[in-house]
Structures are given as C-alpha cells and as structure tokens.
Image (cartoon, helix red, strand yellow):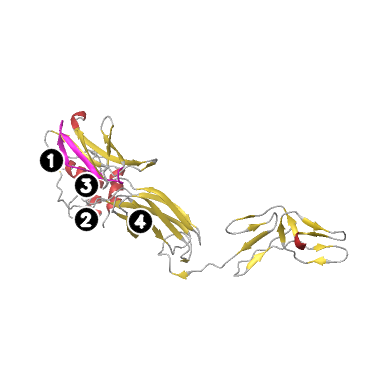
Amino acid sequence: MFFLLLTFTLWVSTALASDLTSPSFIIRDPVVGVGGGYGTSGSFRVFQSLDESVIGASSSSTFLGRFGFLYFPFVEEESSPGSGGGGGSSGSGGSTNTGVNFSGRAYPLSKVSILKDGQLVLSTIAGPDSNFSASLTNLASGNYTFSVYGEDKNGLRSSPFTFQIFITANIITNISGIFIAPTIAVDKSVVKRGDNIAIFGQSAQTASVIISVNSAQEFFENTLSDTNGIYLHNFDTSLLELGSHSTKSKAQKGNEISSFSNTVGFLVGTENVLVDPTAKSAKCDLNEDGRCNLVDFSIAAFWYKRPLSAEFIPREIKHLNGDGKVDLVDFSIMAFYWTG
C-alpha cells in the first residue's frame, strides 16, 4: 500500500514506484514503464530498461496515472487583490485563467448585454448571422448569477436569459447554446374586434417564430423572421372576446428553441387606438415621468389583486403585463426595468 503526501507548492510532486532488488543489487525509485515486454540472454533478463513494468497508462489535465502511481502537478494560483469585480461567494481575487465564455444567438448586428449578480459587466455586438460570443475573465472562484439579454433595432430589450453557475479557480467555463428570446410589440393598445392587430419584433436571422395570444383559449400562430431577424404577423381579432388579452413569442432555429419573450398586452374593444411610436416612457413607468421607481411601485402596490379602474387599465396595458390585473408578473417586469 502506497501513501501519497500531496503538498501545494510550485514544484511538481510525484509518487515514486517501489525499489527493484535482487540478492546482489538494488535500483532506487525506478521509472514506471508502460508495457510488459522484456529482453533476455543466456545470463540475464532485462525488464523495460530496468524500470518497473505496468500494462497501461491514463491521464487528465491534473494527473497522470500508471496503474496505482499518480503524478500530481501543482502550481500556485496567481491572484491580484481586488480583481474580479466583486460578486461570487468566495475568493479574494481573480485570475485571467478563471472566467466564463458566452456564446449563442441574438439578433443580427444587435447589442447583447451580460449582467453578473445584477450588474452590467460586458456588452458585445452579434454578427450579421445573429451569432455572438463574449468572454469574462479575472473572476474569483465562487457562485455567480448571470443574465444575458438582447436589444433590438428599436431599443426594445428581450426577456433575460438567467442562470447560476459555480466558477472554479483556473478554469474557463464555456456557456454555449444561449438563444435570446425575441422582442415583441403590437401596433395598437386597443383594437376594434374583428380588425387585425400587428404583432412584430426581432429574433434570430431566418428563424421560425411562434406567437401565442392568450385569451379564454390560447391561440398559436407561426411566422418567419427575415434575414435581418424582423418578423411580423397580422392577427385576426375576430377570434377574441372583448376585454384584455396578451401576446408573447419564442423562436426556433434547427433544434434550438428560445424561451418566451416578454408579454405585451392589448385590449379588444369597439375602436382602434394606435400605440404611439414616439412614446419614451419607460416600461413600468406608471406615472409617466420617464423613470421606473418607488412611485410606480407604490401605484402598482395599490392595485395589487384589486379590480382595475377604467382610468388605470390603459396604463396597465402600456407599462405592465397588460392582462387586466396587477400580480407578481407585473412586479417582475418592474424589477427588470427598474431605474431608481
């Protein structure tokens, strides 16, 4: 039985094979050789050039194993105080060899932003083919929450793609297959029943876009995005009853499917009210002062799980979920667009 004493130093530590002996000689710490062949003559026999033979070897990036003999290289981790930008559950600094590579699909030539623990740390631009990649290094080891979102040509944000991972020191973690959800908008805040409402947005280039319209019955429609990722579908509202409705979309390209987009609400009524394309009020800006803050939170809190007044419904449609009620979904929207 061999016992290994492993020490974290700058030197390479090894476990030595057992001595080879005979009545007339001893070979100290022989090299372990792979294979089992030997050479002979009338007066001697040589095993693997005087090494100890084994039948095979295996290895990884951190050890080499020769059937019972493990060779562990250890190198002291380099660190610089204060690097890593904060976040994570442990570590006093970061290393250029510690980080995350992100890659996936967004919208052609669109801005892609990456948040670490709720803070914007990185932005990049997707290529004309919708693909993007970005790297974040100098991280300390620990747990992180990352969010990735896209921004279309009209400045609309996608719903965030959020995940948690543990970052290991001196390891680059690859997060691939990210598929940013489409953006979505409608051309009318109120649509006359029987008229069409345009549902549009941006997604990956030449992707299949599935549009969901929520009503007493949920309807699904399919369309294709063009080479710029733009999609448009005119939905016949004669299928819908009067009242509040909402729509959302997701995209598929090959075997990859995105999550659903943000939800956009609209009313089916007796007249058409177009959405003002020049409106600059922030999403969730219930008092329409250009910000999303505690004032808006207080307004939403007042209407939480209460029947909405006729005066408040248009604002709920424009700035929140648009489903005719204020619930946790609306507060999630507020948290995402919060400006303070």
- The residue under label 2 is which amino acid type? Arg
**Which mark, residue 114?**
4
Residue type pointed to by label 1: Val
Residue 21 vs residue 303, the one in the foreground = 21
Range covered by the magenta-colored residues: 185-206
User: Residue at label 1?
Assistant: 273
44 vs 97, left or right, is right
Q: Is label 1 or label 4 in front?
A: 4
Q: Main secondary structure of the magenta part?
A: strand
Q: Secondary structure at mark 3?
A: helix
Q: Secondary structure at mark 4?
A: strand
Can you tell which quarter of the image residue 306 is in?
top left
Query: Disc 3 marks which residue?
Result: 319
Q: Name the residue located 47 percent from the left edge and 55 percent from the top edge.
A: 166
**Which amino acid type is shown beneath numbered disc 3?**
His
10 Å crowding of disc 3: few (<14), some (14-19), many (20+): many
- Ranked by sequence position, the earlier of labels 3 and 1 is 1
Between disc 4 and disc 2, the foreground one is 4
Instruction: Residue 3 in the image: state x and y as whole percent.
Output: 71, 60
Q: Secondary structure at mark 1?
A: strand
Position of residue 36 measured from the top left corner of the image (x, y, whole percent): 75, 54
Mark 3 to mark 1 CA distance (whole Å) = 16 Å
